[in-house]
Image (spheres, rainbow, N blue to C red):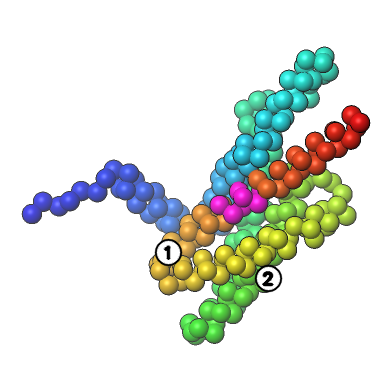
Amino acid sequence: MAAISKPAHQNLAVVLLTAYLSSLARQPLVTKACTTATLNFLQEEIAQRASGMRSAEKSSERRAAFEGRPAAKKSLIEHVVNKRVLQFSLYGLLVSGPLNHYLYEVLNKVFANRPKNKLNTLLTILAQNLIISPILNSVFLAANAVIAGERSVENLAKIIRARLLGMMKVSWVVFPCVQLFAARALPPLVWVPFFNSVAFIFGTYFNTQGKIRALKATRAEEDEKRE
């Protein structure tokens, strides 16, 4: 009986997943940092376009050219890739990816010698959601604001206080379910790419919403100035 061949795209997906998991096993820190940088690049690019920020910037540039005002100078690399997209990617490579790696390394060491029972599973999930997740989300909000141009430490603290709870409420509802699903239905080898995919979706959503709020605030200020 002839073997049933898999579609080419399934074979490619298996090859890519195998290569990624192999790299993750050999060089976890580098692999996670590069993965986060790539996902952040895509996340910021999508958020800028979905929120209308990219269109607003282009409209502003056209308006400035029409009115004869000098356009903002761009570096050579900014003609190839958006500055904030590059900054957000570098944040993933140098800050978010390594921080995520080391926080979970500490968590894994804390629970390494404990028996794998329901109590320790619950304690692990609580530690992830009450300690690690707030740290990562706070750093994300601060970095997002800095990349957007904010430099005041006081304002950064206000932004975190104003938005962190909203992010955490979603995290507390969604991620325990995601973690329980992964623990029961997925092999541990694919947990990292699975969690990365879920974090990418929610990160893109929150990033887009933040940009929509910032765009509305900017337009409200411009309307006040005209009046």
Position of residue 165 relative to residue 56, above or below, is: below
- Location of the C terminus by quadrant is top right
Q: Count of labels shown?
A: 2
Q: Amino acid at mark 1?
A: Leu
Q: Point out the residue furthest to the front here.
A: 227
Q: Which residue is tagged 1?
A: 189
Mark 1 is surrounded, within 10 Å at the Cα level, by few (under 14), some (14 to 19) or many (20 or more) other residues, namely: few
Q: Quadrant of the N terminus?
A: bottom left
Q: Residue at x 66, y 40 (%)?
A: 51
Q: Is residue 6 magenta?
A: no
Amino acid type at circle 2 is Ile
Residue 214 visible, this orientation:
yes
**In x, y percent, where is residue 155?**
86, 52
Few, some or many C-alpha atoms within 10 Å of disc 2 (few <14, some 14-19, many ≥20)?
Answer: few
Find disc 2 in the rendering and name its residue: 131
Q: Quadrant of residue 133?
A: bottom right
Decide if residue 30 is in sight here.
no
Nearer to us in this view, 16 or 9 = 9
Q: Residue shown at 77%/20% (left/top)?
A: 63
Which residues are the magenta region? 201-207
Q: Earlier in the sequence, mark 1 or mark 2?
A: 2
Query: Residue 5 at x, y = what percent?
Result: 20, 48
Image spot of residue 13 (x, y percent) = 36, 48
Q: Nearer the viewer, residue 7 or 74?
A: 7
Answer left or right for 222 relative to 47.
right
In which image quadrant can residue 129 be found?
Answer: bottom right
Q: Secondary structure at mark 2?
A: helix
